[in-house]
Amino acid sequence: MQRFLVDVGLLNVLVGRERTSDRGHILENIVYLELLRRGYKVWTGRLRNTEVDFTTKNRNGEIEYYQVSWGISNKETEKREFAPLEAIKDNYPKFLLTKDAFTQNRYGIIHKNVFEWLMEK
């Protein structure tokens, strides 16, 4: 089970060093907290035969899926991050959030810049 911090700045204090190598996990933590702030119910971990970062229910009770990655600049990472969402065969919205400036939607998966997503609503 993953744990999420309320203040990602505490992570640096707790480990006594800068955690730039863990940027993806820190970004995932930020998205998790934002989903909670928006009033979503959030689950993490396995979903059927795959793992997706977050399965959520929004305030209207609608399911949404979120995958978070620092970036998908190479084909291996792109495949790894899209694959869990592609494996889910329902018609609920699926989002891949990255820091990439150029996004690419595919197979109904909405790829968004995470910083623009954070500014929504």
Image (cartoon, rainbow, N blue to C red):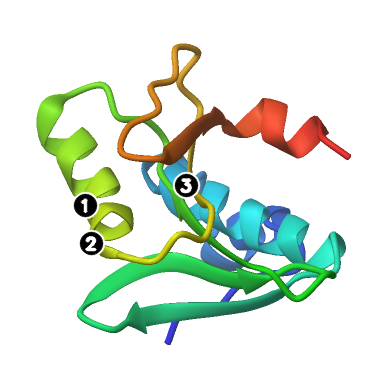
Residue 12 horizontal/vertical position (percent)? 60, 54
For the residues marked 3 and 2, what is the alpha-carbon distance in whole angstroms? 31 Å
17, 94: nearer the viewer: 94
Residue 109 horizontal/vertical position (percent)? 41, 41
Q: Is residue 26 left or right of residue 67?
A: right
108, 99: nearer the viewer: 108
Whether residue 27 is situated above or below residue 87 in the rendered picture: above
Q: Residue furthest left?
A: 76
Secondary structure under the numbered disc 2 in the rendered image = helix
Q: Is residue 38 left or right of residue 101?
A: right
Amino acid at circle 1: Ala
Q: Nearer the viewer, mark 3 or mark 1?
A: 1
Q: Is residue 9 left or right of residue 95?
A: right
Could you classify mark 3 by the number of other residues whose Cα lies within 10 Å: few (under 14), some (14-19), or many (20 or more)? few
Quarter occupied by the N terminus? bottom left
Secondary structure under the numbered disc 1 in the rendered image = helix
Which residue position is annotated with label 1? 83
Whether residue 111 is situated above or below residue 86 in the rendered picture: above
Res 19 label: 3
Please tell me which residue is depicted at 44% across the width and 19% down the height of the picture.
Answer: 103
Mark 3 in CB contact with mark 2 (< 8 angstroms):
no
For the residues marked 3 and 1, what is the alpha-carbon distance in whole angstroms? 27 Å
Please tell me which residue is depicted at 64% across the width and 62% down the height of the picture.
Answer: 32
Residue 92 horizontal/vertical position (percent)? 51, 61
Amino acid at circle 2: Ala
For the residues marked 1 and 2, what is the alpha-carbon distance in whole angstroms? 6 Å
Please tell me which residue is depicted at 60% across the width and 34% down the height of the picture.
Answer: 114
2, 36: nearer the viewer: 36
Res 38 label: none
Mark 1 in CB contact with mark 2 (< 8 angstroms):
yes
